[in-house]
Image: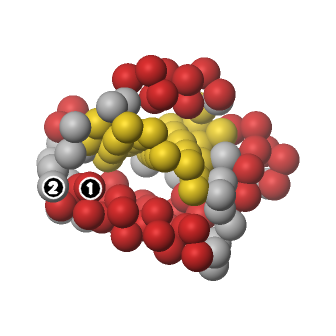
Amino acid sequence: MHIGIMITAAPGSASLFTAERLIRAVLARQWNISLFFMDNGVQAMNRFLPLLTDGQPPSSENRLQCIVCAHNCEERGIQISSEIKAGSQADWARIVNEAERVMVFG
């Protein structure tokens, strides 16, 4: 199963908390998940770094992919971690096309 999730929710929001719980449940099932952060969600991307780096297999086998809207980060003066891909709406379109289920948390 491949799940695509867009996160536009700001840190501290109930939507972000729900998204994080869902992401952990998806990873526990060993499903693939692609996260796309945009709008206020770019402020929350670093919250998910431990899921990328703690106890994960080599990147070719990672079940979690994180992409952040580079334009939204630039607007807000946010640095993008090397573990997270700087992307665009084209990346989100690809996720929507490839994923079996898509969700948005805003």
Say what amino acid the circle numbered 2 marks. Answer: Arg
Q: Residue at x 45, y 39 (%)?
A: 102
Mark 2 neighbour density, 10 Å: few (under 14) some (14–19) many (20 or more): few
Say what amino acid the circle numbered 1 marks. Answer: Val
> Residue 52 occupies which quadrant of the picture?
bottom left
- Residue 94 image position (x, y, % from top left): 49, 22
Left or right of residue 51: residue 71:
right
Q: Residue at x 76, y 44 (%)?
A: 72
- What is the secondary structure assignment of the residue under circle 2? loop
**Would you say the residues marked 1 and 2 are in contact, meaning their CB atoms lie under 8 Å apart?**
yes
54 or 24, nearer to the observer: 24
- What is the secondary structure assignment of the residue under circle 1? helix
65 or 7, nearer to the observer: 7
- Residue 32 image position (x, y, % from top left): 26, 41
**Quarter that holds the C terminus:** bottom right
- Residue 3 image position (x, y, % from top left): 35, 41
Q: How many marks?
A: 2
Mark 1 neighbour density, 10 Å: few (under 14) some (14–19) many (20 or more): some
Left or right of residue 17: residue 25:
left
> Residue 43 occupies which quadrant of the picture?
bottom right
From the image, tell me which residue sits under label 1.
Answer: 26
**Quarter that holds the N terminus:** top left
Color encoding of the figure = secondary structure
From the image, tell me which residue sits under label 2.
Answer: 29
Residue 18 visible in the current orientation: yes
Q: Residue at x 60, y 21 (%)?
A: 90
Residue 62 visible in the current orientation: no
Q: Is residue 48 above or below residue 35?
A: below
Q: Residue at x 63, y 75 (%)?
A: 13
29 or 63, nearer to the observer: 29
Tell me how far mark 1 sits from mark 2, CA to CA: 5 Å
- Residue 88 image position (x, y, % from top left): 64, 29
